[in-house]
Amino acid sequence: MPARTRLKTMHNPSRKIMEEAAEWLTIMQDTSLTPSEQTAFNNWRTLSPQHEQAWLTAQDLMGMIDAVPTEVGKTIWGRKRLDRRSAFKALATLLFIAPGAKILWDEWSSLSADYKTSVGETQKITLIDGSRLYLNTASSVNVTFNATQRVLHLIEGEILVETAKAKSGKSFPPFVVQTKSGRIRALGTRFSVRQFEDREEIRVNVYEHGVAITPASQVTETRLNKGNTLTFNSNKTMKVITLDHPTPLWVSGQIISDNMKLGDLIAEISRYRMGVLRCDPAVSHHRISGVFQLSNTDVALNVIASTLPVRVSRLSPYWISIVEK
């Protein structure tokens, strides 16, 4: 089916779904799927309209590549076979230029962002004023720094900010993180901001000093001090809660579970790996404590299976379920 027909309806696949589609695309370029991989792929494709849209786009891209003669393809693509990162960029571009696609599609914004990370990747950046910016998995930001403003535009994901102090006799403009639901103004501080993908909420954790939060539809700032966290949306701020840990653990590549529900832990681990990682509702109530390394989530899953009455069911490396033993 031509790309023009397929892409007339846009379901806005998330960045993670697009990367998963790119992963499947590159796997299928290498070899035929095994029966278990085929089952995993079929299950992945039917998870949501966004998954189906991403795969239809991937098929269109593959058809375009196959239609290009080999020698011409080398010139256009650099190589006939796409790696995952190249496939993801090409898929996003195809969605962006497709008839009926939203011009302000979030994925295009993330692709063209000043700083960005892939699923499972973290990054540390020193900004021009000396402030330090840390990006968590699948995150992207744009930076606007000049004589009158210091603004980080959080497009997606999660960041940690350590603001720099101005040298003696000098001053900096206010340091602001702008999100889809409002703004966070730093008050000489160390804080993290997470923009949730599946709901219009922002979570702010303060590790030093304080911040001032203003939801998009409000004018009054809410002060949040060291050791506290709160969630807000465009209309209001929620209840202030004490932080569980005095430092963001993901910066050091860890998740610490302190009597956490298994379902919550698996949801958090899934942010750091490609594909689908699911927890059967029948076992999601189990509680678990421990320190888990994000650099090797397979090891974390095996530890969970050896600790609780559950097992890791692997249809493929990209479709994993935690089920009853």
Image: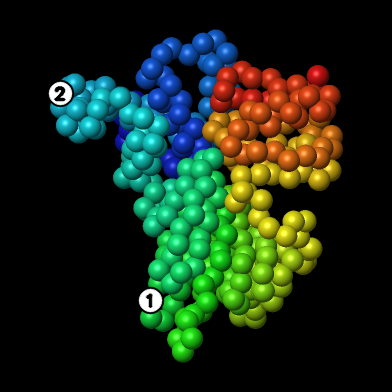
Q: Is residue 199 above or below residue 222?
A: above
C-alpha span from label 2 to label 1: 47 Å
Give the label, 2 or 1, closer to the camera.
1
Residue that extends furthest to the bottom in the rendered view of this protein = 169
Q: In which quarter of the view is residue 232 placed? A: bottom right
The residue tagged 1 is 146
Is residue 241 among what the camera can see? yes
Among the two numbered marks 2 and 1 on one chain, the one whose residue lies closer to the N terminus: 2
Q: Which mark is residue 221?
A: none
Which part of the image, by quadrant, shows the C terminus?
top right
- In the image: residue 95, left or right of residue 312: left
What is the x, y in percent for residue 90?
33, 38
Report if the CB atoms under discs 2 and 1 are less than 8 Å apart.
Answer: no
Name the residue type under label 2.
Glu
Q: Residue at x 60, y 33 (%)?
A: 296
Helix, strand or loop under label 1: loop
Q: Residue at x 41, y 26 (%)?
A: 25
The residue tagged 2 is 71
Helix, strand or loop under label 2: helix
The 10 Å Cα crowd at callout 2, few under 14, some 14 to 19, many 20 or more, is few
Q: Residue at x 75, y 21 (%)?
A: 311
Q: Residue at x 54, y 40 (%)?
A: 120
Q: Is residue 304 above or below residue 169?
A: above
Name the residue type under label 1.
Asn
Which part of the image, by quadrant, shows the N terminus?
top left
Q: Is residue 236 above or below residue 250?
A: below
